[in-house]
Image (cartoon, rainbow, N blue to C red):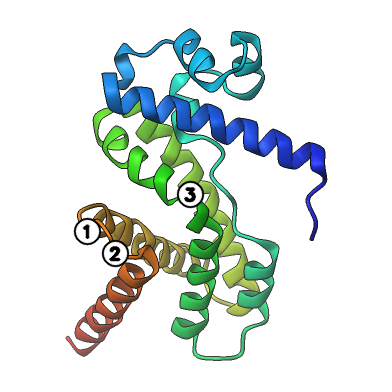
Amino acid sequence: MTVPLRERRRIETAREIQRATLRLATERGLDNVTTDAIAEAAGVSPRTFFNYYTNKEAASVGLPPPFSEEARAGLRAGTGPLPDDLKRFLDRHLDDLSGDEDIIRALGPIIHENGKVRSLLDQHLRSLRADLAGCLEARLPGASDALRMELADWALQAIGNAIDLWLGRPGQKLRRTLDEVWAAKLEAAKLVAGA
């Protein structure tokens, strides 16, 4: 699917504002950064800043991508073992994030320091969880809502755990870290099932 030029420009402006926010927050601490300073660093007016974000915390989180329709359709229609199809689904999402590794790396410490930023990211993760659980409904007809939500949590934790590990491993690819975490999650599931 081709994104219209106007929408691509809007996305790029949003990312530039986010990158300026993260750069200033890294230098000064988010609490010491104003929206005027962010706008100036991003090369936009304060009014433009507020056309994109409600506050500096929202600008820090930016516009996290949802799961792609391709990934969602692939999971819903998947016929392989569920762990393999879930891993492919997560890999596709990481592919969508691959151009934003600088943003993820800069955002990591801010999430741990700022409760408002963490809360905004948690809202996004709840949305992803509900979306993934919906995909699993098509894949696992008859499964309870609780089971689908638990599977969605389990899968999304892999991405969160991979990002946490990756932040401490400069030079390593995020996808490689996800592979490592996914293998550990599958091994842990076997241990729990065997218990």
Residue 87 tag number:
none
Residue 169 tag number:
1
Q: Earlier in the sequence, mark 3 or mark 1?
A: 3
* Residue 140 screen position, x and y as percent: 58, 79
Which image quarter is the C terminus in? bottom left
Say whether residue 120 is left or right of residue 54: left
Gap between marks 2 and 1, in whole Å?
6 Å
Residue ID at (36%, 63%): 174
Question: What amino acid is found at the position of numbered circle 2 in the picture?
Answer: Gln
Disc 2 element: loop
Residue ID at (55%, 91%): 80
| Position of 120 relative to 160 (above/below) | above
- Tell me if residue 40 can be seen: yes
Give the quadrant of residue 171: bottom left
Question: What amino acid is found at the position of numbered circle 1 in the picture?
Answer: Arg
* Residue matched to label 2: 172
